[in-house]
Image (tube, rainbow, N blue to C red):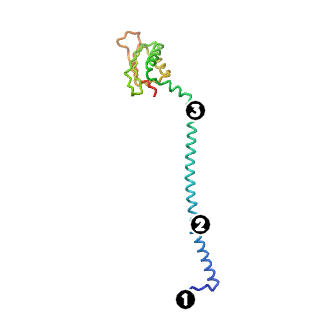
Amino acid sequence: MTGFSLPSTPRQKIIITSSLTVLTILVLVAFVTWPSIKEIRRLNTEIDAQRLELEELYYKGQSLKETLEAYSKVKPTIGTLDRVYVERGQELGVITTLEQVADSSKIKQTIKTNEVDKSKQTMPLQLELVGDLTRIINYLGAIEALDLYINIDTVRLGSVGRIETKDGALSALIVGNAFYKP
């Protein structure tokens, strides 16, 4: 009967001891070190994800800081924005202002407005002007300088036909919109 026999020679003892040592190391690696390596890799992945999240939060914080700085620079002009819009029911004030500009520019002006649609945010304007080119340009410059935002869609210049005026007089048609306060 042949069974397991103990090593009898020093060479066999060294081989068996070395084999058992290698086997013990492999068992330690398999059951202790390998799970630790997997845990370290998992932690490394989580740390990278948190680092990316922190970087994103940092950039959002920087963006918020820049936004707040930009807001603080713009904040003084917010009142100006309120003035450029027409209050509902204050259309007569706009027409009066345009008439004053025409008088100061020394041009003849006729203002036509369409009936205001309550659902729209615009007040349609049609301005018919008669005057020389310099005065019409001065008038347009004065409108531009107003604290009123008027979006001009059309400007037509032509010679004066049936109206008796001085030489060099032009007629101008300006079509645009003023905007109601939202």
Badge 1 element: loop
Q: Residue at x 53, y 26 (%)?
A: 79
Q: Amino acid at mark 3?
A: Ser
Mark 2 and mark 3: span between their CA atoms? 57 Å
Quadrant hosting residue 64:
top right
Check the image and name the residue furthest to the left.
Answer: 162
Query: Closer to the camera, 85 or 104?
Result: 85
Q: Which mark is residue 33?
A: 2
Which amino acid type corresponds to the residue marked 2 in the rendered image?
Thr
**Amino acid type of the residue tagged 1 in the rendering:** Thr
Q: Earlier in the sequence, mark 2 or mark 1?
A: 1
Instruction: For marks 2 and 1, give the CA distance.
Output: 38 Å
Q: Nearer the viewer, residue 30 or 129?
A: 30
In contact (CB < 8 Å): disc 3 and disc 1: no
Label of residue 72 in the image: 3
Q: Report the residue at 63% width, 80% height from top.
A: 14
Of helix, strand and loop, which one carries label 3? helix
Question: Of label 2 and label 3, which has the lower sequence position?
Answer: 2
Residue 144 in picture, x, y percent from top left: 48, 22
Q: Is residue 83 left or right of residue 126?
A: right
Q: Nearer the viewer, residue 118 or 171?
A: 118
Q: Which residue is mark 1?
A: 2
